[in-house]
Amino acid sequence: MKGHQPRKRFGQNFLVSPGIIRKIVDAVAPRAGDTVVEIGPGLGALTEPLLDRLEHLHVVEIDRDLIERLRQRFPPERLTIHAGDALEFDFGALSSSGLLKIVGNLPYNISSPLLFHLAEYAAVVSEMHFMLQKEVVDRMVAAPGGGDYGRLSVMLQYRYSMERLFIVPPGSFNPAPKVDSAVVRMIPLKVGVTEGNPHGTGEMKCPAAGTAADPELFARLVKAAFSQRRKMLRNTLKEFGGEALLEAQGFAPTARAETLAVADFVRLANVLAAQQTQTK
């Protein structure tokens, strides 16, 4: 870290624990020929051990000082640096040589919007491994009925099989954050082939939940349902039919969003999609 001052605006907490670094790389299990993308390589704590197992690595980095350090340290034939914001990066542009493996120690301050951005590219990804604030990971993998279960849980569980692998204590970083972190594995749920997908050919499907006929409608429904967690669904889903919709599908109008499983939201969204088709 010599010579570089961590920048709060980029949420920089640099991983320095050799043991944790080794566990993450082992979890990713990179092999020669894999197309691997690292988000936020920072000072290269994961970059170097990843390159020990890969012929080539892509990284996405926003900090110009760190970009220059990486350029001085790694030759371009081994490391391709994509300078810019990961929230705006087109990951699909890297998929021409095969499905992507994406890894990173994600900044806490953009973790949720970045996960939603990455979900757009699930069709061109084989798996992802991220270190995030433990609280965020707990929300990602939460089951219905608990306080951690919310919009993030539903939208990600619709697209991915997820597993929290291990907890990372604050002392593993410099500077040390005030909270625990955790590493999560995310594997896209794919089946069949679909045309017209701007980011790839795999149709996203959760075997237990089914497929949303209108993904945008599904996303709007989930967002509305969790917009006011303490309110009943008959109120939060008024614009979608509220009480009438819920009763017709066997749900108590007094239920709250956290009691519905992913499959329940898919079913409601598909009923609405069918109704819209019939009225056209």
Image (tube, rainbow, N blue to C red):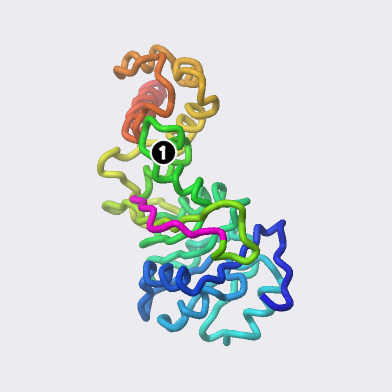
Instruction: Name the quarter where the N terminus is drawn.
Output: bottom right
Q: Residue at x 41, y 66 (%)?
A: 101
Instruction: Name the quarter where the C terminus is drawn.
Output: top left
Q: Quadrant of residue 86?
A: bottom right
Q: Quadrant of residue 217?
A: top left
- Provide the major secondary structure of the magenta segment: strand
Q: Residue at x 71, y 58 (%)?
A: 8
Tell me the element at label 1: helix
Q: Which region shows up in magenta?
A: 161-170
Q: Is residue 37 above or below residue 120?
A: below
- Across the whole image, how many numbered discs are drawn on residues? 1
The one nearer the camera, 245 or 177, is: 177
Q: Residue at x 64, y 82 (%)?
A: 71
Position in image of residue 236 (x %, y %): 50, 21
Residue type beneath disc 1:
Val
Q: Is residue 218 above or below residue 239?
A: below
The one nearer the camera, 111 or 271, is: 111
Residue occupied by mark 1: 154
Q: State whether residue 123 appears in this view.
A: no
Position in image of residue 51 (x %, y %): 47, 81
Position in image of residue 265 (x %, y %): 37, 31
Residue 39 vs residue 3: left or right?
left
Q: Quadrant of residue 73?
A: bottom right
Position in image of residue 91 (x %, y %): 50, 62
Counting other residues with Cα less than 10 Å from the Cα at mark 1, is it few (<14), some (14-19), or many (20 or more)? many
Residue 74 vs residue 277: left or right?
right
User: Does residue 162 belong to the magenta stretch?
Assistant: yes
